[in-house]
Image (tube, rainbow, N blue to C red):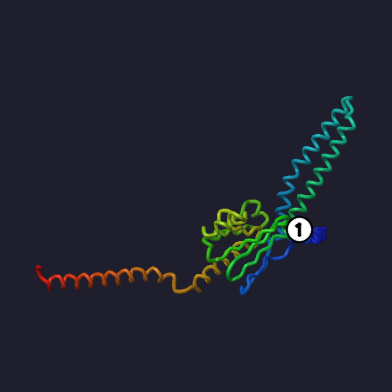
Amino acid sequence: MIDFLVAILGPVLKVRPTPPHIPKGALDPVVFRASERYLSYRYLLASVQIVPMFAAAAVFAVSVGVAGDHGKPAPTAVWAIFSLVLVGVVLGAAFSLVGVRLDWEFHRYVMTDRCVRIRRGVWEQVEATLTYANVQNVRVVQGPLERLFGIASVVVDTAGSAGRTAQQDPMLKHHRGVIRGIADAHALRDRIMERMRQGKSSGLGDPDEAPEAEPETEATLLRAVREQARGLAADLRGRGPA
C-alpha cells in the first residue's frame, strides 16, 4: 500500500524518497534515516490524537440510542449525519496514519566529512545543510516516551551566520537542525563532534597559537615607534635653540 502511494505521489509531486544529494568530493558519506521504533512512536502519537474523535462519535451514538429507548426514535437524518461523521473520522484516522508513514519514508539524512544534510517532506520537500564549521553545539534530547521506545533526537546548534537559512527553513529555526528518531543518538553525536574536531585540526595554523601572533605584532610596532621617537629627540638636541 505504502509502496503504491510512494510510486504515485513521487511523479505527481516531483519528489522521491531518496537521500539528500552528496556534495561532490565529500569523503566517507553515511546515509541513514530514523529508526523504525521512531515510526512506532509516531503511530502512537497519531493514535492518541485520533482517540478523542472516536470518543465523540461514540458519545453521539449512545445519546441517539438513549433517546430512542425513551420512546423518541431518532430521525433518519440524525443517523445519516452520524454515519457521515463516522466515515469522516475513519478517513481522517487513515490519512493521519498514512501521513506518518510517508513522512518517515521521505525523511533521510546524509553525514559526510564536511557536513550533515537533512531532507524531509512530501508536499513540500526541504533540504538543509549543517556544515561542521558553523556548528557550535551538539546535544541529545530525549523525552520520557522516547526513552520507552529507545530513541532520541540529536540537536545541532549552528552559528548565527546561518540566520537567513534558518528563516527560510523550519528545520533550522533558531539556527538549529534536528535529527529525529535515532536509536544510537549518543554515538551519532560523538561522530559529529569528532568530525568537527577533525575539520578544525585540518585548518590553516594551530588555533591555540593564533592569539599569540597579535601581541607579538603590537610589541614590534611599539618598539619601532620608540626607536623613531628616540631618533627624533636626538635630532632636536643636536640642533639646539634656534
Task: Give the image quarter of residue 189.
Answer: bottom right
Please state the horizontal and vertical placement of residue 84, each as a whole percent of the image: 84, 39
* Mark 1 crowdedness (10 Å alpha carbons): few <14, some 14-19, many ≥20: few
Task: Give the image quarter of residue 64.
Answer: top right
User: Which residue occupies 75% across, 57% down?
Assistant: 102
Q: Nearer the viewer, residue 71 or 12?
A: 12
Q: Amino acid at mark 1?
A: Leu
User: Which residue occupies 64% across, 71% down?
Assistant: 29
Q: Is residue 94 left or right of residue 199?
A: right
Please state the horizontal and vertical placement of residue 168, each as a whole percent of the image: 61, 55
Q: Is residue 195 above or below residue 156?
A: below
Please state the horizontal and vertical placement of residue 109, each as a whole percent of the image: 66, 64
Q: Is residue 7 left or right of residue 147?
A: right
Count the labels in the image. 1
Q: Where the N terminus falls, by quadrant?
A: bottom right
* Disc 1 secondary structure class: helix
Q: Is residue 99 above or below residue 217?
A: above
Please state the horizontal and vertical placement of residue 180, each as a whole percent of the image: 64, 58
Q: Is residue 43 above or below residue 108?
A: above
Q: Is residue 187 left or right of residue 39?
A: left
Extreme residue toward the front, this view: 242
Q: Where the C terminus falls, by quadrant?
A: bottom left
User: Which residue occupies 72% across, 50% down?
Assistant: 44
Q: Which residue is mark 1?
A: 13
Extreme residue toward the left, this view: 241
Task: Give the image quarter of residue 82.
Answer: top right
